Amino acid sequence: MNSRLLPKRKTSSAKSELARIESPLDAASFYNGLLLAGLMKEVEYESTTGSGKIKKFLRLVDGTEQIGFNRESGFHEFKTESRFYVDSFYDAYILSVNSIAQHASALFESVNGSREE
């Protein structure tokens, strides 16, 4: 199918979308939820300042094209910025929040389980 016939989907940053839906999460927390869900991954790279320091950034993994994409950063050719489709951001938000809730529940169970012993 010719991609020019498909409607262009509006994209936005996580920070903008979180503000739009009045979420209590900040972008870092949202990204951590997606990381827990396996929808983002940490990518390491060596600092471009020559310090040898290892830095990290998060990017969407393959298979997440329905919620967003990784746009090349204007600063480094290897670093990307995640962009989210406005019409499916709520889906990404729910996946993130559910992953955070599952993590909290597992943590609660492990703490309470160790207290009962």
Image (spheres, rainbow, N blue to C red):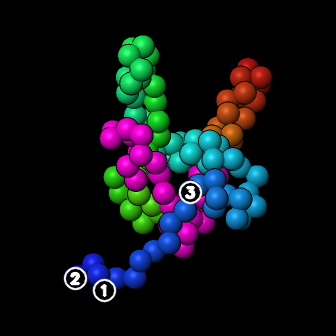
The segment highlighted magenta reads: 71-99
Residues under labels 1 and 2: Cα distance? 8 Å
Residue at figure coordinates x 29%, y 81% from the top left: 4
Viewer-side label of 1, 2 = 1
The residue that disc 2 covers is 1
Q: Residue 87 is drawn in which quadrant?
A: bottom right
Earlier along the polypeptide chain: callout 1 or callout 3? 1
How far from the left and from the top, in percent, is residue 1?
Answer: 22, 82
Residues under labels 3 and 2: Cα distance? 28 Å
Amino acid on which disc 2 is placed: Met
How far from the left and from the top, in percent, is residue 49?
Answer: 42, 20
Amino acid on which disc 3 is placed: Ser
Amino acid on which disc 1 is placed: Leu
Quadrant housing the C terminus:
top right
| 12 vs 104, nearest the viewer | 12
The residue that disc 3 covers is 13
Q: Is residue 88 visible?
A: no
Q: Residues within 10 Å of mark 1 (few under 14, many from 20)?
A: few
